[in-house]
Amino acid sequence: MANADVVLEIRGLTKRYGRATAVSGLDLAVRAGDVYGFLGPNGAGKTTTIRCALGLVRPSEGSVRILGHDVATQFRDAIAHVGALVERPAFYPYLTGRANLRLFARLAHLGDDAVDAALDGVRLAAAAAEDRRYGTYSQGMRQQLGIALALLGTPRLVVLDEPMNGLDPEAVRAVRTLVRRLAAEHGTTFLVSSHLLHEVETTCNRVAILNAGKLVIDGNVDELLQPAIVDVRVRVTPLDAAIECLRAGGFDGATRVEDGVVHVRARAEDLASLNERLVRSGFRVSELAPLRPTLEDFFLERTRADGKPDASSSRR
């Protein structure tokens, strides 16, 4: 592996199902301690990529390496330090949640302390302590137990496919906090596929967007959401004269949006001169607020610009 800091390395990954190509020439590098958001519309190839990464599906072309081990030829070594939740978690319905986790813990040579830590982390310890079988769990509780299983023993790489499905707000917050803490304190690396863009924005430090099986963009979340041209909300009086002043100064996009407020598009480095021009011209500026785009805005813009997923691609 070229970079020892890379935990998950995907190179030239292509997966075909007959004539349909679910993933095409994908390159990704997920580094130690990353909370890496993996986004894309339905049919973009996210789950196919995850299945290939975990050795559940064999790629048509390309390679996947985890901690330097090739998943195709060194599967046991590659997967030894990986926890995963892919689609629906599967447990024995006639056992309690704790008994299910204990069974998996014994297979991994882990003790009850690892089970307790996993249940506590997802706020399921109280429910799991009850003599209640998994078959009676709600969808959200089943999802929490699946996440607990993925985190059992604090693996070095955790892959979570739509982890927030069915969770209530309290459980969502608990999982978000836990993921951040494990990444910061233990260097645990996370690959998180999700449709909840707000959660990805607040939880992940890096993000990749996949569309029609191809990588659209890959980068740091904060950097991606700080464009060179920003929308600025300016509360200024008198308004109409201020708009004319701004347009005369080269801010051609200045437009009224409501009484007392003008909307301007400007380069980030020009915000100080924008404010200075208004103040020196005798206008009263009570608010000047750059509007940071959301990850949802960015996602929709990039996936629409890149085109809709191929009609032939019906796989996630």
Image: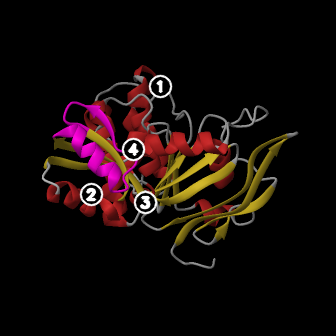
Circle 1 residue: 94
Judge from the rendering whether residue 105 lies leftward or rightward of residue 6; answer left or right: left
Question: What amino acid is labelled 1 in the image?
Answer: Tyr
Circle 2 residue: 274
Looking at the rendering, the stretch of residues picked out in magenta corresponds to 238-261
Mark 3, Cα crowd under 10 Å, few <14 / some 14-19 / many 20+, is few
Calculate the distance from the C-alpha at mark 4 to the C-alpha at mark 3. Answer: 15 Å
Question: What amino acid is labelled 4 in the image?
Answer: Thr
Looking at the rendered structure, which numbered label has been put on residue 298?
Answer: none
Q: Residue furthest right?
A: 19
Mark 4, Cα crowd under 10 Å, few <14 / some 14-19 / many 20+, is some
What percent of the width, then of the height, locates residue 76? 65, 62
Circle 3 residue: 228
Secondary structure at numbered mark 3: loop
Circle 4 residue: 294
Calculate the distance from the C-alpha at mark 4 to the C-alpha at mark 1. Answer: 44 Å
Q: Which residue sits at x=16%, y=40%? A: 238
